[in-house]
Amino acid sequence: MRNKKQYYFYPVYFDANRSRSQGRRVKKKLAVKSPSIQDLAQAATILDVPFELNSEAIYPRFWWIPSGRLQVKKDEAIKNKNALLKKIAMQLRKIHVKK
């Protein structure tokens, strides 16, 4: 059962190759192509957000693809999940430009 004191982020939330109905949660111009769980962890580290990495977790809609999951503890400094989604997405864009 999920812990309501944490936010969960899957790489598919930021994948430009996926549609909204397939699980993408950010605008297409903020999304990147095929982000990995390591990219998400790097973005969270840059943002100085405390997180746990669960590399064995799967996104329920794509249960056959092991993608991993980033777990972020809810904090007063984090306004809400959508605000954090956008911040992580912007960092992912910067990370993918460097690659």
Image (spheres, grey):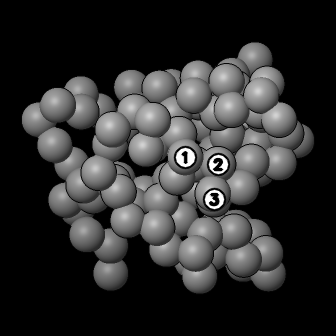
- What residue is disc 1 on? 42
Q: Residue at left 52%, top 52%?
A: 41
Between the residue at mark 3 and the residue at mark 2, the CA separation in whole angstroms equals 5 Å
Residue type beneath disc 1: Gln
Residue type beneath disc 3: Ile
- What residue is disc 3 on? 37
Mark 1, residues whose alpha carbon is within 10 Å: few (<14), some, or many (≥20)?
Answer: some
Mark 3, residues whose alpha carbon is within 10 Å: few (<14), some, or many (≥20)?
Answer: many
Q: Quadrant of the N terminus?
A: bottom left
Q: In the figure, residue 6 lies in which quadrant?
A: bottom left
In the displayed structure, 44 sits above or below 80; it is below
Work out whether residue 37 or residue 26 is closer to the camera in this orientation and state it. Answer: 37
- Picture coordinates of residue 64, whole percent (x, y): 79, 81
The answer to the question of whether label 1 and label 2 lie on touching residues, with beta carbons closer than 8 A, is: yes
Q: Residue at left 19%, top 59%?
A: 5
Q: Residue at left 58%, top 75%?
A: 55
- What residue is disc 2 on? 39
Circle 2 SS class:
helix
In the displayed structure, 63 sits above or below 8; it is below
Residue type beneath disc 2: Asp
